[in-house]
Amino acid sequence: MDKNIVITIARQYGSGGRTIAQMLSERLGIHYYDKELLRLASEDSGINEDLFRNADEKIKNTKLFKIAHSVYHGELIPPESEDFTSMENLFNYQAKIIKKLAEQDESCIIVGRCAEYVLKDYDNVLSVFIHAPKEYCLEQAAKKQSMSPKELEKYVQKVDKRKADYHRYYTGLEWTDARNYDLCLDSSKLGFERCVDEIIAYMNVRFQD
């Protein structure tokens, strides 16, 4: 790649989005950021990494939080404020790291955390949403979670609802809306390898000189 490109990957639980991101990282020879973002945000802010981990892709489970929005505008809350370690500021610091990664010389892949929204004004970003039908996601999830079918279904629904609420809270947009992404892929129809092929093919067309 001649220029630095950032690929953001949002994914439904069980769709294989994280695996696809890892495969893409290996194929392109570029870094892949997921949980590592929490450590980087912690180091940058001086806020304990556990606080970032506890707030990761979650919002407070209260009616007020579900109704309210705290759409991200890029500002950071200063350390002297009592809101310095608020969930909003934890998100702000993650967003700061995401922007820093988009502005560096190296290409990379960023998984989740509303990265496609944070970087919506950057012209070197390719945003991808990986999805699949419920049955497929449950089948894939069963390989990782030892639960009864009923428990697993509830778990997958809960994780995806949490991601959707988190996305809506910080962006004001619907997480599964195709208009928020450059490319939406059904991993059940393509398989992981072909998803990687499609992302690279799209990237080559989009960013050809």
Image (spheres, rainbow, N blue to C red):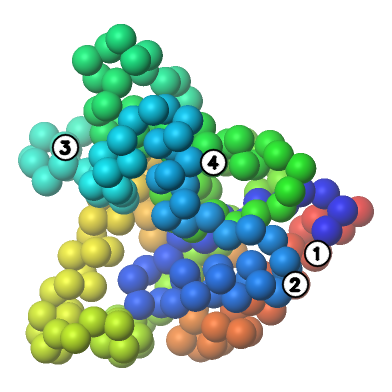
The x and y percentages for residue 168 are 31, 45
- Total marks shown come to 4
Q: Quadrant of residue 139?
A: bottom left
Disc 3 crowd, CA 10 A, few/some/many (<14, 14-19, 20+):
some
Cα distance between the residues tagged 4 and 1: 24 Å
| Left or right position of 141 against 6 | left
Cα distance between the residues tagged 2 and 1: 6 Å
The numbered dot on residue 201 is 2
Residue 208, placed above or below residue 143: above
Q: Residue at x 27, y 44 (%)?
A: 50
Residue 7, placed above or below residue 45: below
For label 4, the residue is 98
Closer to the eye: label 3 or 4: 4
User: Amino acid type of disc 3?
Assistant: Phe
At numbered mark 3, what does the secondary structure look like: helix, strand or loop? helix
For label 1, the residue is 205
Q: Residue at x 55, y 68 (%)?
A: 21
At numbered mark 4, what does the secondary structure look like: helix, strand or loop? helix
At numbered mark 1, what does the secondary structure look like: helix, strand or loop? helix
Cα distance between the residues tagged 3 and 1: 41 Å
Disc 1 crowd, CA 10 A, few/some/many (<14, 14-19, 20+):
few
Asked if labels 1 and 3 touch by Cβ distance under 8 angstroms, the answer is no
Marks 3 and 1, the one that precedes in the sequence = 3
Marks 4 and 2, the one that precedes in the sequence = 4
Asked if labels 1 and 2 touch by Cβ distance under 8 angstroms, the answer is yes
Asked if labels 2 and 4 touch by Cβ distance under 8 angstroms, the answer is no
| Left or right position of 123 against 14 | right
Q: Is residue 36 visible?
A: yes
User: Amino acid type of disc 2?
Assistant: Ala
The numbered dot on residue 65 is 3
Disc 4 crowd, CA 10 A, few/some/many (<14, 14-19, 20+):
many
